[in-house]
Amino acid sequence: MKKNRDVKLEKNIYAAGWLLLLVGIILLAVKRIFPADFALPPCVFHKWTGYYCPGCGGTRAVKALLRGDVIGSFFYHPVVFYGAVLYGWYMLSHTVEYLSKGRLRISIPYTEKYLYGAVFIILIQWILKNGVKIIWGIDLI
């Protein structure tokens, strides 16, 4: 049985997407006005165990993606690229549908499958990065 779309939820996600874009633009503008580079504290899990946590590389992936380094971003943490593609696809398709007042029904529906996909990507990259470190002793990030 096919589940009905939750239009209210999708509108809330769409509004949150615009808010996220606005906050991102403001932060980038502030960084241009006040060019300060700050370092985040090291990952506590990595510091204590020597192995990568499931989120290791996420911040570097975001920074690489903002610089336009798609391959580097994907290498640091593939879920960041995955999320950016989903975000862009979701926002673009919903914007087209809203501007056409529903005549062009191209918006992608929200589904938890996208979240399960992200969890799968996170687990796979975590296993691979730590596997390479354990087997060959190579630090990938």
Image (spheres, rainbow, N blue to C red):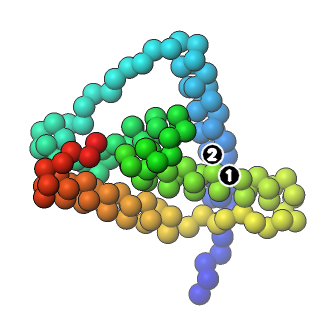
Q: Residue at x 60, y 64 (%)?
A: 110
Q: Quadrant of residue 37?
A: top left
Residue at left offset 50%, top offset 64% = 114
Q: Where is 5 relative to 48, above or below?
A: below
What quarter of the picture does the C terminus occupy? top left
- Residue extending farthest to the bottom is 1
In the rendered image, is residue 86 in sight? Answer: yes
Residue behind mark 2 = 17
**At x 20% / y 37%, what residue is drawn?**
44
Which of 119 and 12 lies nearest the eye of the viewer? 119
Q: Are marks 2 and 1 in contact (CB under 8 Å)?
A: yes
- Amino acid at circle 2: Gly
Residue 30 in percent (x, y) is at 57, 18
What amino acid is at disc 1?
Met
Query: Which residue bears the numbered disc 1?
Result: 91
Q: In the structure shown, which secondary structural element does the residue marked by tag 2 occupy?
A: helix
Q: Position of residue 36 (x, y in %)?
A: 45, 14
The quadrant the N terminus occupies is bottom right
**Above/below status of 30 relative to 83:** above
Q: Secondary structure at mark 1?
A: helix
Measured Cα–Cα span from mark 2 to mark 1? 7 Å
Q: Is residue 93 left or right of residue 23?
A: right
Sequence-earlier tag: 2 or 1 = 2
> From this viewpoint, which residue is outermost toward the top?
34
Mark 2 neighbour class, 10 Å CA radius: few under 14, some 14 to 19, many 20 or more = some
In-image side of 57 versus 30 (left or right): left
Reply above or below: 63 against 31: below
The answer to which of 111 and 81 lies nearer the viewer is 81
Residue 126 is marked as none
Give the percent coordinates (x, y) of residue 8.
Answer: 68, 59
Whether residue 12 appears in this view of the structure is: no
